[in-house]
Amino acid sequence: MKRIVNEMKLRLPARSQNESVCRSAISAFCSELDPTVEELGDIRLAVSEAVTNAIVHAYRELPMGEVGYVYISARLYDTREVSVEISDNGCGIENVDEAMKPAFTTGSSDRCGMGFLVMENFTDQLTVRSKVGRGTTVLMRKFLKP
Amino acid sequence: MATATLSKKGNTLTVRLECEIDHHTAKDIRERIDRSLDSERPGELILDFSKVSFMDSSGIGLIIGRVERASSIGAAVTVTGASGMIRKLLSMSGIEKLKSLRIV
Ligand SMILES: Nc1ncnc2c1ncn2[C@@H]1O[C@H](COP(=O)(O)OP(=O)(O)OP(=O)(O)O)[C@@H](O)[C@H]1O
Ligand SMILES: [Mg+2]
């Protein structure tokens, strides 16, 4: 049985300023397991993608002046596993399989539809659950080298 | 916080990126480069990533968008100084296949 070493929960308004806040928080949180520079970079990148999606896409239908929240729940296990769940209560994704295809985007011309591909490539396990009108949860796992 | 330093020499506009590139910072960088492309009309745009310690897919979008903008005024784009993780991102995105983009 794996045991939890540490856990963290964060709730932040979906403002773009909080993208770097989330990266800093997850870095500090993981440092206890002494990840390599590369492993830490991978985690920061994957978390940044998921958080950015919650900020850019999830609340696009909210009326002006209202703000949604991004939730992060992270755990470290004694098996050197890092698990991070990023969720929102936003609009949800109609077709998750389609959304995860490279180059698929509903965003502006500044977006290239690479976020999910990056998350898949830089983590060891990725699960996306979404319900239209309810929100989206992205669960990622990274197994650190012994 | 400074995000980038732009300088023009001859026909070349060089942008030295100086921050973590994410969706938040990309907006300012994009606007400054596009303003400069419009006013300076260079023949070449160099994007120097050697001072960039972090970039996510927002950076890919930033490059693709600038390649399109630059092409429309006949300028080619060169990406320099991309290290380990950024290189990995660039090759993953397939961006290397863009005709008017050179990665050195
Ligand atoms: N949290 C979310 N809420 C609602 N829709 C989402 C969410 N995350 C992703 N999506 C949808 O999935 C699509 C693909 O996401 P992905 O991160 O791969 O690309 P992108 O965000 O559009 O572009 P990029 O990440 O390259 O800037 C998005 O365009 C959006 O339609
Ligand atoms: Mg994205």
Image (cartoon, coloured by chain):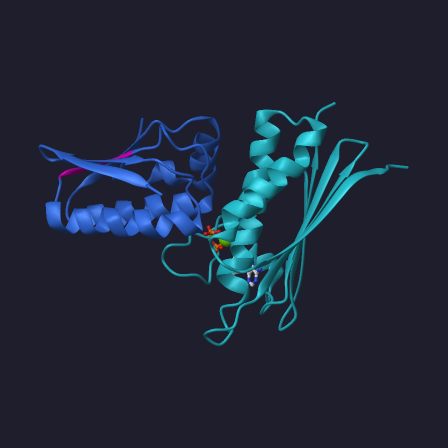
Q: Relative to residue A66, is residue B90 drawn left or right?
A: left
Q: Residue furthest front?
A: B1
The chain displayed cyan equals: A
Q: Is residue B73 above or below residue A34?
A: below
Task: Identify which residue is drawn at 32% across, 41% down.
Answer: B2
Decide if residue A118 is in sight here. Answer: yes
Q: Residue furthest top?
A: A146
Which of the pair B32/B43 is nearer the observer? B32
In percent of width and height, residue B50 lies at: 35, 28
Decide if residue A122 is in sight here. Answer: no
Which of the pair A6/A2 is nearer the observer? A6
Task: Identify which residue is drawn at 56% across, 42% down.
Answer: A23
The chain displayed blue equals: B
Asked if the magenta segment contains residue A44, the reply would be no
In percent of width and height, residue A135 lies at: 64, 66
Q: Is residue A53 above or below residue A60?
A: above
Locate residue B20: give its quadrant: top left
Asked if the magenta segment contains residue B45, the reply would be yes
Identify the magenta region: B43-47
Q: Is residue A22 above or below residue B52?
A: below
